[in-house]
């Protein structure tokens, strides 16, 4: 190659790199979200049938950003994008897609192409994707996969959903306890192609293949070659294969784990769970709890209207029933309200402030139950503390709002009734916000799902009854 040709080739390479960097800058805003301009460029390239430009645009994005891009495109444009993804890129993107889009994409991609993509993934991610397939498509994809990968996926799918068995990956690095550091490193170098793409610990096993310890990779590389693994290994936190994923996440958080071995009932090592899987679980469970507190089970941007109505309507109907019961209190005091219309103006304020106080306590209690910071050991202490907070807030608000009511209506008895009702309702709100989730947890129900309905009922009923009842005694 002549010098001029080499210089030209280097210049072209530099220009190509600069162009990719420019596209990366254009693709994402300061908040790392895709820009409308970049999405428009992708749509324009697809409309023009410019395959080269489309591949160039996709190559500038991280797989997670391509997954976001798919959410902004219609089905036709998604199909066009899929044509320009190789199996490795497709595999990484599938794991990042929103559930609704992923199901659509999985049904669109040919079984042979999908099988090749799944071979690029760890067994846990591959099993998660296969589980989303319809039965016929699943059989076709598994039939197109090599025996080893197929067996690993089928084995993972045999475990219940949301258990450690479904969460774990079969690819795990282990070594016998009589090996030295040098033997271990040499073996891994020889078998490099069979190692997981990413791992943090080497699990030391006994002759029955049960983990007896672990050696972090960083510790392994700093140790002498003649050091036996048994001398440098650390204790491990074993995860039973049938353990619920929330319990697994709690163990990882409590003991600050990066990875942990998964064992079957006899104690034999069958896989591992890594921190990236746990981060996904924590995010998933947190989203579920947040949505459940609002009586919502699906906030996916691609969920259809009917599914969203089915998820939300039942809780609204229950809330309607509890609201009607609370409103019956107003009917019971109808005569008093007719005598003093001011009561109708003030009683929603008492109920509203109580509802806000109850929601505050409820959020703290549900979070405490989810993180295991709140349990039978400290539940009484927590309830009494929340009662004290509610009473204190009630007194403080009663003092402030009582003055405001007096300035507006010039009636000290009305101010007193309003203040006393506020103290009662905030006290009951804090009590209900703490006790309701604890009771539901004791009954085996998810406190995040239905607690808000009962707490709202308690604050509305108490607010109306306390204000109208006290006002009837003092004013009329």
Image (cartoon, rainbow, N blue to C red):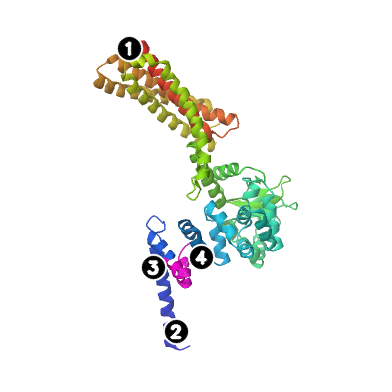
Q: Separation of disc 2 and disc 3 at Cα?
A: 24 Å
- Is the magenta region chiefly helix, strand or loop? helix
Q: Which mark is residue 22?
A: 3
Q: Nearer the viewer, residue 273 or 150?
A: 150
| Residue 468 sits in quarter | top left
Nearer to us: label 4 or label 2: 4
Q: Earlier in the sequence, mark 1 or mark 2?
A: 2
Rendering coords of residue 328 (x, y %):
45, 20
Magenta span contains residue 475 = no
Label 4: which residue?
80
Tell me whether the residue at label 4 lies in contact with that at label 3, contact meaning CB atoms closer than 8 angstroms.
no
Nearer to us: label 1 or label 4: 4
In the picture shown, does residue 180 fall above or below 165?
below
Q: Separation of disc 1 and disc 4 at Cα?
A: 74 Å
Residue 56 in view: yes
In magenta, the rendered stretch is 44-64
Tell me whether the residue at label 2 lies in contact with that at label 3, contact meaning CB atoms closer than 8 angstroms.
no
Query: For the C terminus, which image quadrant?
Result: top left
Q: Which mark is residue 475?
A: 1
- Relative side of 56 to 257, left or right: left
| Residue 144 sits in quarter | bottom right
- Relative side of 130 to 40, left or right: right
Rendering coords of residue 253 (x, y %):
54, 44
Magenta span contains residue 60 = yes
Q: How many marks?
A: 4
Q: Earlier in the sequence, mark 1 or mark 4?
A: 4
Which residue: 44% across, 81% down?
9
Which residue: 46% across, 63% down?
61
Q: Earlier in the sequence, mark 2 or mark 3?
A: 2
């Amino acid at each position: 190659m002549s010098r001029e040709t080499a210089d030209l080739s280097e210049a072209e390479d530099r220009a190509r790199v600069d162009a990719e960097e420019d596209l990366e800058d254009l693709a994402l805003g300061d908040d790392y979200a895709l820009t409308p301009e970049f999405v428009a460029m992708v749509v324009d390239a697809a409309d023009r049938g410019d395959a080269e430009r489309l591949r160039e645009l996709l190559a500038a994005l991280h797989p997670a950003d391509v997954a976001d891009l798919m959410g902004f495109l219609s089905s036709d444009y998604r199909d066009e994008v899929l044509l320009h993804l190789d199996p490795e890129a497709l595999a990484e993107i599938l794991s990042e897609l929103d559930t609704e889009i992923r199901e659509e994409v999985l049904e669109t991609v040919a079984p042979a192409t999908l099988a090749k993509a799944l071979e690029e993934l760890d067994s846990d991610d591959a099993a998660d994707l296969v589980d989303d397939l319809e039965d016929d498509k699943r059989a076709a994809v598994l039939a197109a996969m090599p025996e080893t990968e197929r067996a690993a996926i089928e084995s993972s799918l045999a475990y219940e959903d949301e258990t450690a068995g479904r969460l774990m990956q079969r690819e795990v690095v282990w070594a016998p306890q009589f090996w030295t550091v040098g033997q271990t490193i040499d073996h891994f170098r020889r078998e490099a192609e069979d190692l997981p793409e990413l791992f943090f610990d080497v699990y030391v096993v006994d002759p029955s293949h049960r983990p007896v310890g672990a050696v972090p990779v960083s510790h392994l590389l700093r140790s002498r070659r003649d050091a036996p693994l048994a001398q440098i290994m650390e204790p491990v936190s074993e995860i039973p294969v049938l353990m619920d994923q929330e319990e697994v996440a709690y163990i990882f958080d409590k003991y600050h784990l990066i990875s942990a071995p998964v064992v079957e009932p006899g104690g034999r090592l069958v896989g591992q769970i890594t921190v990236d899987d746990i981060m996904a679980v924590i995010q998933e469970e947190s989203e579920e709890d947040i949505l459940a507190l609002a009586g919502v089970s699906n906030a996916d941007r691609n969920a259809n209207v009917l599914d969203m109505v089915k998820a939300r309507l039942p809780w609204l109907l229950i809330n309607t029933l509890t609201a009607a019961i609370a409103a019956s209190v107003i009917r019971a005091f109808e005569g008093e309200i007719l005598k003093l219309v001011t009561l109708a103006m003030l009683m929603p304020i008492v109920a509203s402030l109580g509802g806000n106080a109850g929601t505050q306590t409820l959020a703290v209690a549900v979070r405490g139950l989810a993180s295991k910071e709140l349990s039978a050991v400290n539940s009484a202490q927590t309830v009494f503390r929340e009662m004290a907070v509610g009473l204190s807030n009630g007194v403080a608000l009663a003092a402030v709002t009582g003055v405001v009511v007096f300035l507006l209506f010039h009636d000290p008895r009305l101010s007193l009734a309003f203040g006393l009702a506020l103290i009662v309702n905030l006290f009951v709100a804090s009590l209900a916000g703490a006790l309701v989730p604890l009771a539901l947890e004791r009954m085996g129900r998810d406190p995040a799902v239905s607690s808000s309905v009962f707490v709202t009922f308690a604050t509305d009923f108490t607010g109306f009854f306390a204000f109208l009842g006290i006002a009837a005694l003092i004013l009329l």
